[in-house]
Image (cartoon, rainbow, N blue to C red):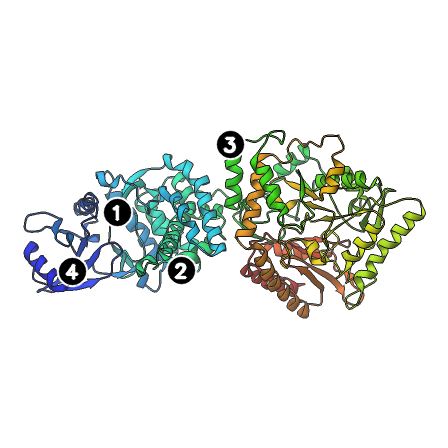
Amino acid sequence: MDIAEMKVLVQEHYGMEVSVQPLDGYEESNYLLTDSTGRRYICKVAGMDSNWYLLDAQVKILQHLAGTPVVESFQQVQLNRSGEAITVTPAGYMRILTFLEGKIWAEEITHTPSLLNSLGQFMGRMDRALEGFAHPAAYRICSWDLRNTMAAKAHLSAIKDHERRRMAAYFLLQFETEIVPQLPHLRMAVIHNDANDYNVLVKNEAVTGLIDFGDMVYTQLVNNLAIACTYAMLHQQDPLAAAAMVVKGYHQEWPLTAEEIACLYYLIAARLCISVTNSAKHTAEGSSNPFHFITEKAAWELLYQLIKINPMAATDAFRIAAGLSPEIIPEDRYTSLLAERKQHIGRNLSISYQRPLKIWKGALQYLYDDKGRTYIDCVNNVSHVGHCHPSVVHAIQQQAARLNTNTRYLHDDLVAYGRELTATLPETLQVCYFTNSGSEANDLAIRMSRHFTKQKDVIVLDHAYHGTSTVAMELSPYKFDGKGGFGKPAHTHKAVNPDLYRGPYRYGHENAGAAYAQDIADIIERLSGEGKGVAAFICETLLGVGGQIPLPPGYLEKVYQHVRAAGGLCIADEVQVGFGRVGNQFWGFQLQDVVPDIVVLGKPIGNGHPLAAVVTTQAIADAFNNGMEYFNTFGGNPVSMACGRAVLQVIQEEGMQQHALETGEHFLQGLRLLMDKHTIIGDVRGHGLFIGAELVRNRDTQEPAVPEIDVIVEKMKDRGFLISTDGPLHNVLKIKPPMVFNKENADAFLWHLDKVLEEL
């Protein structure tokens, strides 16, 4: 409607002479009316396709509030000449409401603790005043109702940024897991449902009003507080402290239950997820309405802040704000738990850190302990695509709820995963065997090589580690030469570690790869002189326990030539480094431009689910099919296959290999800058997100910086970063984070490591 038309309608139906000024609106047309005395009103016109009953509910709730002590805080409904609150006009349904004075929350520059507390008190008073209010139209399905949060999943695909989409999906998974089961047990009420930063009015350091009941709905009472907290947290340096002040004010006016408080953290996340998915949907639809995107940027910023807040810390902050006792026990040293662990669990299972951590929850690259602290996981490469990645979790849940049995029955996912996995490998590697761990897979790979070659002897690298089975231990100098080890078996032969920092051939040597490979040739020649052949050469394609060492250029090419000339097979252990971690390539062996005869996969393949694989050539597989059945009770089971497919799909669809390349290069560059500043860093090496930093007391003597490195690891843990050590001398910082680790995480790590090194 134009202004002249609006004036006529207002005069005709309300007997008011007014000036008219159009205002912005989300779903309705809004106008500011001013009469001859200067009194102002808001006129709202909803389209004829609008729900009349919902408009009536908005009228009735304002009329209800008008009869309570909070009457001054809400708009009053103006009746038309017929005594009706809603006027039917050719343009739509018209309502006129009084104008509330005040500045909108979004325009208030400083949100002081007093103002935040006032917001909570206001919401509590309103909800108390609405106790018992009912209207049939409030019992509806509303996309902004937090109990319908899971409907936002349908719009996740509209979020094009991988990191953002993954984070929103993670919070939706947590809502489904943590909140949905609690919803039936929470108090219900008709609530405003939209105390956003453009609906809350502020005057003189206090909240004085709330407008727009268009999203009102019958739902869980606590949702109203959660929404108010969400918008109070926007643009805050300490969003948790801001929310706690709102909770405190609310509880003072309308006491919360412990169950409601326990849900607040994920309800706040739910509101943000609904907001960002709606914005993404509107973007995909080509919307030009600025109201569709007004909170989008701030909502994403808050989600990034929220995932760094331990949910247990948030709940305790809310409990304390409400005057309840905290649940976190900071002085607990786990004495009882450690004693029970000693009694019932094998004592040679180690525990990390001088003060053990009790981790109770994971969130992509973050881990939460039971003391309320959040840690950036910089070492758990097993959780390859992130802790609790929603796609992987859902795949496991759905298949576990449907069927889990063995490979003696036909199952589509077994074949599909084999096809998808081999599609990432060279053409000759086309036959899969699925197992439950890298140890088991390496065991099987050696068994296959011995059967194919009719030989027993295996060449490994010094300090290598290939698993915990009996055969794998026999291939692992890290174990058999270590404390409690049984010594090198006669059929295992150690080649020198191709270490360009400490070995005989170092950085700058033109043919270091070939020079190191000559040691393999010498071993083969010695075995030949004893009348023995070689069953296999096995090595990690970047050395893990050996010290996070990339192999010298050309090394595997020469080694494979020597081994194959002697009739042996070449086994690439990709358990630590495969699936895009190295960035430049999907598999570590591709960095060396070689094709193995057998590839062993583990750790990241299942993102923490027990899954591993051996992939080999048709010829080796045919020879292994000698009449003796190979059967693995759990290997290749439907749940594992669904999991493996989901992990591979996530890696590919979310561009994780490229992410590892870009983030890894950024991280390595930062570490090298620290190396220029701190002489304790003797070497920085790696590819992608497989990184090592070797620490020394003296760069000339290369004396290992032990126990200094242990102090560094502990201090970094205290600052919220989990790392570990590796290498034969235990002086290499091991950095292999989940692939969702980002540049912001890397920069934070580098800043804190710099401070820790300055303290030494």
User: What residue is shown with label 4?
Assistant: 1
Nearer to me, 32 or 245: 32
User: How far is the residue under mark 3 from the one under mark 2?
Assistant: 40 Å
Mark 1 and mark 4 lie on one chain; the one further toward the N terminus is 4
- Graded by Cα atoms within 10 Å as few (under 14), some (14 to 19) or many (20 or more), the crowding at tag 1 reads many
**Residue 534 percent location from the top left of the image:** 85, 46
**Residue 629 percent location from the top left of the image:** 72, 30
Does 92 sit above or below residue 137? below
User: What residue is shown with label 1?
Assistant: 126
- Graded by Cα atoms within 10 Å as few (under 14), some (14 to 19) or many (20 or more), the crowding at tag 4 reads few
User: What residue is shown with label 3?
Assistant: 402
- Graded by Cα atoms within 10 Å as few (under 14), some (14 to 19) or many (20 or more), the crowding at tag 2 reads few
User: What residue is shown with label 2?
Assistant: 297
Secondary structure, mark 4, is loop
Q: Amino acid at mark 2?
A: Lys
Secondary structure, mark 1, is helix
Q: Is residue 203 left or right of residue 96?
A: right
Q: Amino acid at mark 4?
A: Met
- Residue located at (90% from left, 47% from top): 527
